[in-house]
Amino acid sequence: MTLDLSWHPQEDTLHYRHRPVAPSQTTMRNIYKILASQYDPLDYILPFTTRAKVLVQRLWANDRDWDDPHLPTDLLQAWNTWEEELPQLLSVSLSRSYFPSGIDISDITLELHVFCDASESAYGSVAYLRGEDPQGNVHVAFVLARSRVAPKKQQSMPRLELCAALTGAQLAQVIQRELTLQLRETVLWSDSTTVLTWIQSESCTYKVFVGTRVSEIQELTDHRSWRYVDTQNNPADTITRGMTLSDLAKPNQFSHGPAFLQQPHDSWPTPPSFEEVPDETEMKKSSFCGLTSTISAPEIPPVDEYSTFEDLLEATSRSLHGADSQLSTLSADDYAEAELRILQRAQSDSLPEEIKCLQTGKAVPSGSRLITLAAEYDISKGLVRVGGRLRRSSSLEDDVVHPIVLEPKHPVTRLIIRQYDDKLLHSGAERVFAELRRKFWILRGREAVRRHQRSCPECQKWRAKPIIPKMADLPPCRLRLMKPPFYSTGVDCFGPFQIKRGRVTEKRWGIVFKCMTTRCVHLDVLHSMDTDSFLMSLRRFVARRGTPFELLSDQGTNFRGGESELRVSFQVMSEELKTQLAKRQIRFQFNPPNAPHFGGTWEREVRSIKAALYVTMGAQTVTEEVLRTVLIEVEGILNSKPLGYVSTDVADVDPVTPNYLLMGRPDSSLPQVVYPESEILSRRRWRHSQVLADQFWTHFLQHYLPSLQSRQKWVKEMGNLTIGTVVMVIDQRLPRALWPVGRVKKTIMSADGKVRTAEVQVDDRTYTRPVAKLIELPAIPEDTPTMSPADTEPSRS
């Protein structure tokens, strides 16, 4: 008989079938004929066919001919039992698709899981595809399986488990290469803790059998992707134990995958709690064979104890001179000798192999960092120098032609870089690097200089920029949908303006009320910057526009005209305003000081208002009536601006403006709808206004609101500012040299978990500032008082 697969399109499944053949005498030839006639490319019935493979191996244990009819009775009986099960193939079927129909594969997160197991007679692996949709539903599908019979030469169980792990790694590589679906990760499972320990170790420490297989597994897979599974939950265990076709046709762990794959990751099997004892029988025998050499290094004080190169040079000079008294006088030769000893010590720590090769006249190793520099050994000074290609120059100094080679991360090199940076008054990295090259060749020197300047407080005071967190989501006040205009309102003042009152010139201020959702604008004139004037303006606003739910405002530190007066006035009236507005059930909220981007919605309108006023009035002084008239006309212009993108196609819907809600028409210059006299008492006027409001919100939701999704700047994730960080407070009114420096005392976290505001302690004062106005500096010693950059004089040594 022969085995085959048939596809049923109406069921989308593959069914196994067999074709009976004429009975014949059971010989090795006929047995192989039946085995070879199977067509099972996915090895879905592998637990069944592995039983036959094991029988064939046992039949070949003794020398016999292909047509020998005298087979062992027990093995022949086992083969007949296996062959009698073949008609049951009709009950075995395999789903042709991995996941149920109707599921969008692009929305599923896919993982590949490969299970491995071994027994004394066989080993193998089986792979499953695990998919999780956005709703959290998990689907597991059979992909592929492979098996091998155990070698005739008896092997230990850990070795057989390692062979099974190798088949799993090979199976995972084949599926990853051939599968066209995008996999998030691949997980491989084994129930042998010994094998898992081998995979996590270095392959060179084991004998050939284990070492070669561990090395191949580590090349094919990531050692971190291997996990432990207990035998009861390992479907590969079915391959080694075998299974009848009747059992295989029923729902089972091999065809549907283990049950824990249907569960979340935190409920998957974990390694046993007992400590694994390493298998010493598979370890290579180690023996030491080496040559011990000692490189004599000059005796100098520990470099880590000194913060500057000058202090290290002074201590080394006195140590070599034997001068214990601080009153002893040191000569220039003493300092030159000390510097030479320090450089020799730095090179002996960093370049021992190169020094040894150059001292014996050999070339440096091919993998050395000095291979491109044609390094030379200066016998007179005992230093490694750059040979280079400038040796024929007669106008350059010897140190420029043959600079001293230094390793960038050595403590001596860091002190030398700091010395040059201080001497050049913390200039740019290229300037410091060019000056260093006149005497020293620091490997990857530019990177080393930049690394130092990133950690240098003085350099960061002059060049660092604020680390601004990712732009926040829109606040609730910007998303008050289906609410009346000015439900959430931003308030800002601008000015002052000079007006004429008879022969007297007085000041007036403008105030803008901006609807945070619909972008409606209301303008008014303030007679003075006090609480009463603001409250009177608010009463006029409420009478004309209705009572708002909340008012938002900054603290007056970002106004261009009359900045000082506005700032002082807002600070005085803030608490009184909150008290007065609370009685009216209006929430009042102040933004942090010096944070205009917190109120960007109304700040942009202030800019538009000022531009319109400058064009209209210029520098002339007008009366208060003219000023009020111009402001109201500007208000009408701003409320006529379309919301969102304006299409040039006449077939598209006309854009809506804030005037739809305020006036019932897109522009104040357009005529109002005229109804016949017979309709005056009807409800058509009300219906018309309701239609306009519905049209506004429909256009708002479909065309304008989606345009607010993208972030125009501050798109990267940044780390949060932490308490105790040294920062410099940006103050645009002062030069950078006078910006105050302090420590973060308290951080204020926004709803998305980002720190956007902080309180900074500077001496005995506390500043509340946004993160966009704070420059993070490297830590300074606790005993160093906080001060401005101008209070510190850079070293001029």
Image: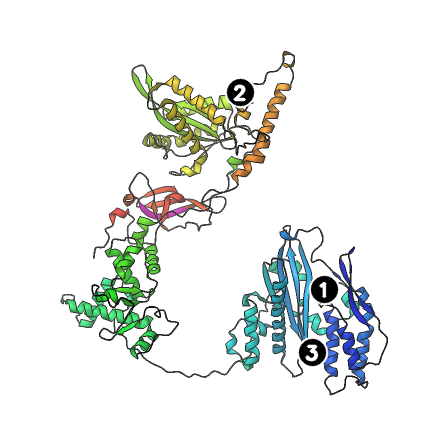
Mark 1: amino acid: Ser
- Give, as a single range, the part of the protein colored magenta: 739-746
Residue 210 image-quadrant placement: bottom right
Q: Residue most toward the right?
A: 22
Residue 330 point in image, percent of width and height = 15, 67
Q: Residues within 10 Å of mark 2 (few under 14, many from 20)?
A: few
Mark 3: amino acid: Ser
Q: Which mark is residue 747?
A: none
* C-alpha separation, residue under disc 2 versus residue under disc 3: 92 Å
Residue 207 point in image, percent of width and height = 54, 80
Q: Which mark is residue 670?
A: 2
* C-alpha separation, residue under disc 2 versus residue under disc 1: 73 Å
Q: Which residue is mark 3?
A: 121
Residue 590 point in image, percent of width and height = 43, 35
* C-alpha separation, residue under disc 3 versus residue under disc 1: 22 Å
Q: Report the quarter where the N terminus lies.
A: bottom right
Q: Residue most toward the bottom?
A: 63
Q: Verify whether residue 348 appears in magenta.
A: no
Mark 2: amino acid: Leu
Residue closest to the eye, 756 or 358: 358
Q: Which residue is mark 1?
A: 255
Q: Is residue 785 left or right of residue 710?
A: left
Query: In the picture shown, does residue 106 fall above or below 22?
Result: above
* Residue 145 seen anywhere in this rendered image of the structure: yes
Q: Report the quarter where the C terminus lies.
A: bottom left
Residue 652 image-quadrant placement: top right
Query: In the picture shown, does residue 662 fall above or below 395?
Result: above
